[in-house]
Image (cartoon, helix red, strand yellow):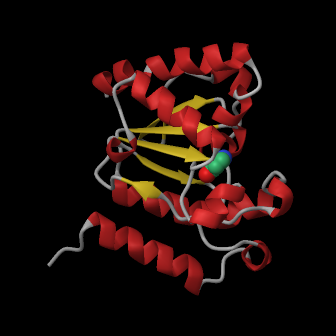
């Protein structure tokens, strides 16, 4: 019998561990933060890397940035059970430093495999790290909130919700960009 999407995702998770991806990050992290949500979702959100709370819980976006993300989802009538969420890098970088280019490159094939299984209508990148990995060569300040079709997949680059925690202007921009998601989905 054909494997369910969840079973296929579980296999990708196992493969990351078996392939010993990013052993240095793995050695300082508590655990792998693979992804969470609905494997049949129309929208997948891709963040940067787990932070402290995510590392402890094993789930993406469960800290302050995640709370703001939940608020923005509620604004457009969605909740976590409607979407799937993951990160480009799946272990917490020490002291929450930016992920290194080689760390992003190592994890990219596994992210692509996740996206192939879920086959969402829309992939929303959160922040420049996941955008750089999936949509090379763009500048987030110029392209945020605009859907882009690339290699057969529709993407929408957004600023990272953590950037909005300390900036009212950024918060308004993100809320505006988020509000476009239902319209974009309806046109795909
Ligand atoms: N920031 C991210 O990019 N990802 C998380 O999972 C949490 C915070």
Work out whether 184 lies above or below 149.
Answer: above
The residue most toward the bottom is: 18
Q: Residue at x 66, y 56 (%)?
A: 53
* Number of on-image labels: 0
Work out whether 13 lies above or below 179.
Answer: below
Picture quadrant where residue 152 is located? top left
Q: Residue at x 50, y 43 (%)?
A: 45
Can the viewer see residue 3 in this picture? yes
- In the drawing, does residue 170 fall left or right of residue 4? right
- Expressed as whole percent of the image width and height from the top left, the position of residue 16 reads 56, 76
Picture quadrant where residue 3 is located? bottom left
Work out whether 33 lies above or below 101.
Answer: below
Q: Residue at x 38, y 44 (%)?
A: 83
Can the viewer see residue 50 in this picture? no
- Expressed as whole percent of the image width and height from the top left, the position of residue 11 reads 41, 77
- Expressed as whole percent of the image width and height from the top left, the position of residue 75 reads 42, 22
- Expressed as whole percent of the image width and height from the top left, the position of residue 126 reads 61, 38
The residue most toward the left is: 1
- In the drawing, does residue 100 fall left or right of residue 32? right
Work out whether 149 lies above or below 96.
Answer: above
Q: Nearer the viewer, residue 118 or 80?
A: 80
Indicate the quadrant containing the N terminus: top left, top right, bottom left or bottom right.
Answer: bottom left
Indicate the quadrant containing the C terminus: top left, top right, bottom left or bottom right.
Answer: top left
Q: Nearer the viewer, residue 57 or 14?
A: 57
- In the drawing, does residue 177 fall left or right of residue 105? left
Q: Residue at x 58, y 64 (%)?
A: 57
């Amino acid at each position: 019998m054909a494997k369910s999407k969840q079973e296929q995702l579980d296999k990708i998770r196992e493969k990351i561990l078996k392939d010993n991806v990013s052993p240095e990050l793995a050695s300082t992290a508590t655990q792998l933060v693979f992804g969470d949500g609905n494997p049949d979702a129309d929208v997948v959100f891709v963040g940067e890397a787990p932070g402290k709370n995510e590392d402890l819980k094993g789930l993406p976006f469960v800290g302050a940035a995640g709370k703001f993300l939940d608020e923005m989802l509620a604004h457009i009538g969605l909740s976590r059970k409607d979407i799937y969420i993951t990160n480009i890098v799946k272990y917490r970088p020490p002291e929450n430093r930016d992920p290194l280019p080689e760390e992003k490159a190592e994890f990219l094939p596994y992210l692509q495999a996740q996206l192939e299984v879920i086959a969402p209508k829309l992939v929303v990148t959160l922040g420049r790290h996941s955008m750089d990995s999936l949509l090379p060569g763009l500048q987030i300040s110029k392209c945020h909130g605009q859907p882009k079709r690339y290699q057969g997949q529709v993407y929408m680059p957004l600023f990272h919700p953590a950037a909005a925690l300390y900036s009212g202007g950024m918060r308004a921009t993100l809320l505006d960009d988020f509000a476009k998601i239902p319209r974009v989905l309806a046109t795909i």
